[in-house]
Amino acid sequence: MADDPPLTSWRVQTGQRKHARRLRAGQTDAEQSLWSALRAHRLEGLSFRRQHPIGPFIADFACLPCRLVVELDGGQHYMISGRARDSRREAMLNELGFLVLRFSNLDVLENRDGVLEVIAAVAKERSGR
């Protein structure tokens, strides 16, 4: 996205940074599986970060150049309170210029290649490649 303004530098509070580190250390099986395919530019040469603070949130995975956030949802995200919280979070990330893709943990564990195809296609579209 050549004409986009440079990415905003978000100030991250120390507590939020520590929380992100804890989340990285305690990844779910689905997060570990997806991260093994996203890390080190393994997916189409894209640069992803895991448990990355964006505004007041910590994104499961973020591709900053594409302004793409990938969220993996466990059971708590399908309860009414979880859906409401996710909706607010997604709206705020959209306001910051990010597109949020959501996948269930089960999707990743049972069909990781399909999930990766969707992520790659959306990232390609957003990056103008």
Image: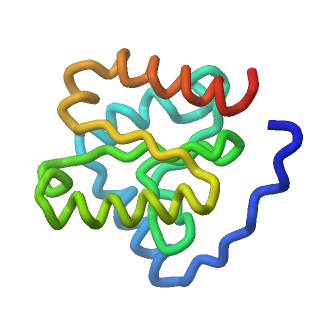
Furthest residue toward right? 3
The quadrant the N terminus occupies is top right
* Residue drawn at (71%, 43%) of the image: 65
* Residue drawn at (63%, 54%) of the image: 97
Furthest residue toward bottom? 14
Q: Give how far across and how far down residue 106 sits, in percent.
A: 18, 32
* Residue drawn at (43%, 65%) of the image: 21
Q: Give how far across and how far down residue 35 sits, in percent.
A: 42, 37
**Pick the front one: 87 or 107:** 87
Give left or right: position of 81 versus 86.
Answer: left
Residue 20 vertical position relative to residue 34 in the rendered view, above or below? below
* Residue drawn at (32%, 59%) of the image: 86
Q: Give how far across and how far down residue 27 sits, in percent.
A: 30, 51
The quarter of the picture where residue 18 lies is: bottom left
Q: Give how far across and how far down residue 122 sits, in percent.
A: 55, 27
Residue 81 vertical position relative to residue 68 in the rendered view, above or below? below
The total number of labels drawn is 0
Task: Specify how the rendered protein is coloured.
Answer: rainbow
Give left or right: position of 113 versus 30.
Answer: right
The quadrant the C terminus occupies is top right
**Pick the front one: 49 or 93:** 93
Give left or right: position of 113 versus 42.
Answer: left
